[in-house]
Amino acid sequence: MNVITPPDPARHPFLTGKPKRLFIDGKWVEAASGKTFDTLNPSTGSVLASVAEGDAEDIGRAVEAARRAFDGPWRRFKPFERQNLLLKLADLVERHFEELAALDTLDMGAPISRTRASRLRALGMLRYYAGQATAIHGETIENSLPGDYVSFTLKEPVGVVGAIIPWNGPLTATIWKIGPALATGCTVVLKPAEEAPLTSLRLAELCQEAGVPPGVVNVVTGYGETAGAALAGHPDVDKVAFTGSHLTGQKIIQASAGNLKRVSLELGGKSPDVVFADADLDAAVPGAGMAVFANSGQICSAGTRLFVEQAIYEEFTARVAAYGKTLRVGNSSDPETQVGPLVSPEQLDRVTGYLAIGRQEGARPLSGGERLTDGDLAQGYFVPPTVFADVRDEMRIAQEEIFGPVISAIPFTDVDEVIERANRTSFGLGSGVWTQDVSRAHKLARSLRAGSVWVNCYQAMDPAVPFGGYKMSGYGRESGKQHVEEYLNVKAVWIKTG
Ligand code: NAI
Ligand code: MG
């Protein structure tokens, strides 16, 4: 595959190629309505591609295809055959990685340095799930019934999975849904986010090339309220795996009630990052900064509530603000860019709205705080790394998910106090601790009510380590053995042998 450096929409093979249709039952088809919608390059505001606008009818066709595939030859694929498919897909993703990274960058605005760096993670996930395909097993369980009975469990694929993903990392989000499905023998209908649907379509092509049978992976692009809602409410979908906002998560649960489908939810957060005065500050400054500035803050587990011990509060917040100013904000295709644009005009409005709210609430901006409109930046949706000091727990910028590069810095004086305040949020996804005191690190690791605790680091992820939320950050785990279990049913089998 030709290497594209830097990503250029006019030369990208997928963008200059065929129309962007729906992938249903192994075929590329128009939406039943014939409608299309545009996806933008957030660095420039220009239209990148026109994409088929699937709706309930297309979701219906895709679910039928997924059901047929689930009941068809796919059901008899041996674990090692599913493993081989995933390994083949991983090889194809590896071969086309540069192109996929460029597509993510152009469609959602993550800097090319970042999307290129997701290579290990993307390939690692596919190969991890490949390994899991041959590690699925039930148990033989001794029972106490009088007479002779053998009892054992079978692990069976849940069935047709509806996967609904957001725009903040389309390549890895897509792999995170189809990986466990292929490993377990489920079939999938994936609905990408309307803001960044292209990488999922390109991955569907690669699934086809890898030999994934028709109907096993289907991709229906379209809007949340139409295509997404139809998938969440479909009576023949067995499970919905959703990643996105908690408000949509609540709608997904309501929509699931009709057939009581299984639901797993990977939602947002307002994650605390706690810096003690004894921390290695040279590491903590960029660590706490990138916990929020990476991907322009568009990460569910971003450490946006920065609790800093009073003794170092002024110095530390000033250093994080200064660090933020050193980051290069710009067009995400530029290899030097460290902070790209927000994904859409809507996200720009949302984040600049919070910048205004923060000032009204009395928070003190130490850096950033305004949209960037110099030169070419005016065409895109750029907000610079922003640090608000003097934030109080009850402020909206300390409670609500902003999903932009905005740190709310809050002082604290005491360990027990900061644990209580860090937990005073309706979310519980990520959390960070910076200290050289081992006892204190352990105490916080046990006390923070969040699905991940990162000590002297932030955002470490691995395909084998479970990731997910407490409280309103959702339930279910992705990555790790738990993730595979989410796509399996347990069946008990009894055989009377006496
Ligand atoms: P969203 O939750 O509305 O969108 C995520 C996915 O859900 C998209 O594919 C969308 O089309 C779909 N969707 C929307 N409404 C649906 C419905 N009624 N039924 C089924 N599917 C539906 O998030 P959105 O609007 O993109 O972003 C709004 C805010 O949500 C962000 O500012 C951020 O705070 C939060 N968010 C959090 C994410 C996370 O990873 N935790 C990811 C995306 C957004
Ligand atoms: Mg786009």
Image (tube, rainbow, N blue to C red):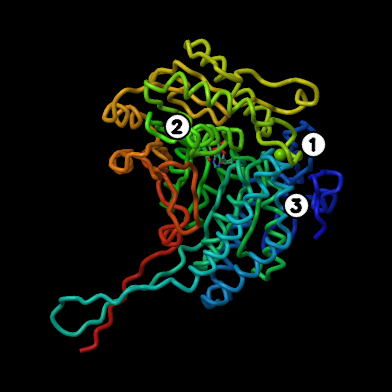
Residue 72 visible within the image: no
Is the CB of the residue bearing disc 3 within 8 angstroms of ligand 2? Answer: no
Residue type at mark 2 is: Lys
Callout 3: few (<14), some (14-19), or many (20+) C-alpha neighbours within 10 Å? many
Residue at horizontal 43 percent and vertical 52 percent from the top? 477
In the image, 459 versus 470, the foreground residue is 459
- CB-based contact (under 8 Å), mark 3 and mark 2: no
* Disc 3: which residue: 21
Which label belongs to residue 229? none
Q: Position of residue 492 (x, y in %)?
A: 31, 72
Q: Position of residue 165 (x, y in %)?
A: 57, 46
Quarter occupied by residue 130: bottom right
Residue at horizontal 44 percent and vertical 15 percent from the top? 390
Residue 176 visible within the image: yes
Of the image marks 3 and 2, the number of the one nearer the N terminus = 3
Extreme residue in the bottom direction: 498
Which label belongs to residue 47? 1
Give me the C-alpha separation between circle 1 and circle 3. 17 Å
Foreground: disc 1 or disc 3? 1
- CB-based contact (under 8 Å), mark 2 and mark 1: no
Q: Position of residue 110 (x, y in %)?
A: 67, 40
